[in-house]
Amino acid sequence: MTALISLVLFDMDDVLSHYDRSARVDHLSALSGRTHETVRQAIWGSGLEDRADAGLITGDEYLTALGEILGCRVTLDDWLISRCASISPNVEVLALVRLLAGRHRVAVLTNNCQLVTDNIQYLNPAVAELFGPHVYASASFGSAKPAARTYLRCLDSLGVCAAETLFIDDLEVNVTGAINAGLHGHVFTSAGALSEELERRKLL
């Protein structure tokens, strides 16, 4: 017997959207004159992205720190252009969301800084259109997935209990974190497998 699900909560990058990190790196490398490896290290190797995703620094502090590491000024527009270049819609998954949204509540919980959700209509218009105001960045909750409080604080904002929520993410560690927090979980591998899971749960 499947559990009663009232909310389907999606990760964004590599689920609702394809995420091309190299495109983001290309833009910042051209801006700063630094090598691709230096840019990758600045964003991910330094821990800067993790701190921003966990809400430990503000968006402005993130841009300033990134610029200091790269040795150039990184404006909000610079960052938005590079981040937008990394995002393309996963049209098959978005089609499933459209079907779901007619019958169940849907929302997004993404490990990202608030710059992403503050500018979601520019960065990811397809997600902005489908989910409206219910696109949440982990930074808003002062922690990142897979910490239990990230999911639970998001659900508090939505007024939904964990036992009635299905969480979908491409990273098994994040799905495990959701399950440990009391949610149901599905590791995303493809739109086809997701469709089968939703049908199995009688959500489609």
Image (cartoon, grey):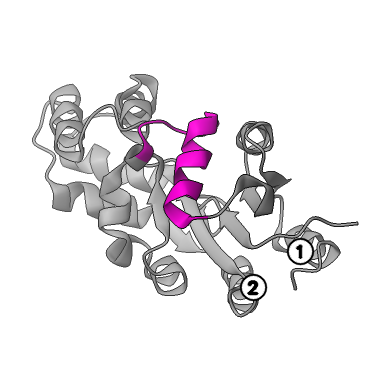
Q: Which contiguous range is marked in magenta?
A: 141-159
Residue 114 at what x, y percent from top left?
29, 46
**In the displayed structure, would residue 148 be above or below residue 184?**
above
Disc 2 or 1, which lies upstream in sequence? 2
Q: Nearer the viewer, residue 29 or 94?
A: 94
Which part of the image, by quadrant, shows the N terminus? Answer: bottom right
Residue 54 at what x, y percent from top left?
37, 31
Residue under the point 70% across and 60% down? 5
Three-letter code for the amino acid on which mark 1 is drawn: Leu
Crowd tier of the residue under label 2, counting other residues whose Cα lies within 10 Å: few below 14, some 14–19, many 20 or above? some
Q: Is the magenta stretch mostly helix, strand or loop?
A: helix
Three-letter code for the amino acid on which mark 2 is drawn: Leu
Outermost residue on the right side: it is 1
Mark 1 lies on a secondary structure that is helix
Residue at the spot of label 1: 198
**In the displayed structure, would residue 168 be above or below residue 89?**
above
Real-space Cα distance between discs 2 and 1?
A: 9 Å
Mark 2 lies on a secondary structure that is helix
**In the displayed structure, would residue 166 be above or below residue 91?**
above
Q: Are marks 2 and 1 in contact (CB under 8 Å)?
A: yes
Residue at the spot of label 2: 100
Outermost residue on the left side: it is 73
Which part of the image, by quadrant, shows the C terminus? Answer: bottom right
